[in-house]
Image (cartoon, helix red, strand yellow):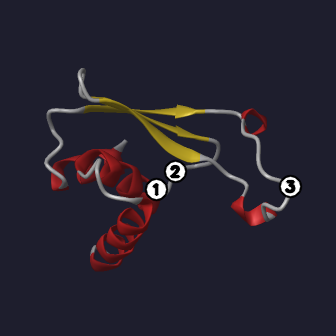
Amino acid sequence: MKLLNKWQGIFKLTDWEFQTQEILPDQVVYDDDCLDEDKYFVGIEIDQLRRVGTIHHDRELTEKDIVHELLHVKYPNKNEDWINEAEELLTNINR
């Protein structure tokens, strides 16, 4: 995937192997109060020892999704708010 390779290089994660894995939407359980527009899943499974990351998703991945998930690999100790802010800054700068 071209965008994945682009951001892997930007984040200097070239010693990692990344793959994507589509899942079915009905494999995800949501709270009853979750809005319909928020009913999607994108998340990364990280294997630090093997340096492998798998992005699981139930819809088409966007550039913002890729940036967000790779930030989790690059900065594993940062919280979700920090990751969200960094993702916004990076994707807006690179437009």
Near mark 3 (Cα within 10 A), the count class, few <14, some 14-19 or many ≥20, is: few
| Residue position marked by numbered label 2 in the rendering | 61
Q: CA distance from mark 2 to mark 3?
A: 25 Å
| Residue position marked by numbered label 3 in the rendering | 32
* Percent of width and height locating residue 48: 26, 29
| Residue position marked by numbered label 1 in the rendering | 65
| 43 left or right, relative to 85 | right
Number of disc labels: 3
Q: Label 2 sits on what residue type?
A: Leu
The answer to whether marks 2 and 1 mark residues whose Cβ atoms lie closer than 8 Å is: yes
Q: Nearer the viewer, mark 2 or mark 3?
A: 3
Q: Label 3 sits on what residue type?
A: Asp
**Eyeballing the image, is 36 above or below 4?**
below
Residue located at (37% from left, 73% from top): 85
Q: Nearer the viewer, mark 3 or mark 1?
A: 3
Near mark 2 (Cα within 10 A), the count class, few <14, some 14-19 or many ≥20, is: some
Looking at the rendered structure, the secondary structure element under dot 1 is: helix
Q: Which mark is residue 26?
A: none
Q: Nearer the viewer, mark 2 or mark 1?
A: 1
Q: Label 1 sits on what residue type?
A: Asp
